[in-house]
Image (cartoon, rainbow, N blue to C red):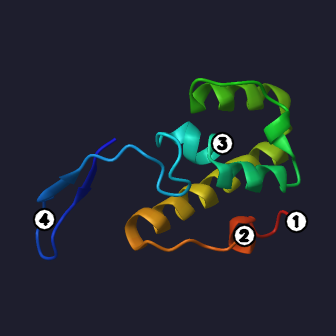
Amino acid sequence: MPRYFANEGESRPSKIVDNRSCEMCKQGDESVLHVLWECGIAQDVWAGSKLCMQKCTTFRTDFLKLVEDLMERLQVEDLEYFFVQCWVLWNQRNSVVHRECILGRLHLEPRGFK
């Protein structure tokens, strides 16, 4: 998906960057599913999470199908954990894309869920 950057003081973008690769792993095409589930960084986070969900589902074609599957399998508390972790991962992605900084592994674990 194209990324739009506005120059300082401008209200609309002046440059369009058409770069589809994931900014975090530089390997896959960036999509919601990739950033939150398939990316190597996301996989490491899920593998180390209290739910170990990475191994509980089969291949998915989009994020909505993944969420639907997890809603059938997980308890409410675990779904809450999943969505908070997704927010943390997306926030990490935004830090990389917009500020070019990567947070450490400890920052990728939702607080209060350990």
Q: Can see residue 76?
A: no
* First of labels 3, 1 by sequence position: 3
Amino acid bearing label 2: Arg
Cβ–Cβ under 8 Å for marks 1 and 2:
no
Residue 13 position, x and y percent, is 15, 58
**Residue at x-position 47% and y-position 43%:** 30
* First of labels 4, 3 by sequence position: 4
Number of the front mark, 4 or 3 = 3
Q: Which residue is mark 1?
A: 114
Cβ–Cβ under 8 Å for marks 1 and 4:
no
Residue at mark 4 to residue at mark 3: CA–CA distance: 33 Å
The quarter holding residue 33 reads top right
Q: 79 or 59: which is nearer to us? A: 59
Amino acid bearing label 4: Ser
Q: Quadrant of the C terminus?
A: bottom right
The quarter holding residue 113 reads bottom right
Residue 8 position, x and y percent, is 16, 76
Amino acid bearing label 1: Lys
Q: Which residue is mark 3?
A: 37
Q: Which residue is mark 2?
A: 105
Residue at mark 3 to residue at mark 1: CA–CA distance: 20 Å
* First of labels 1, 2 by sequence position: 2
21 versus 92 height, above or below:
above
Number of the front mark, 3 or 1 = 3
Residue 39 position, x and y percent, is 62, 46
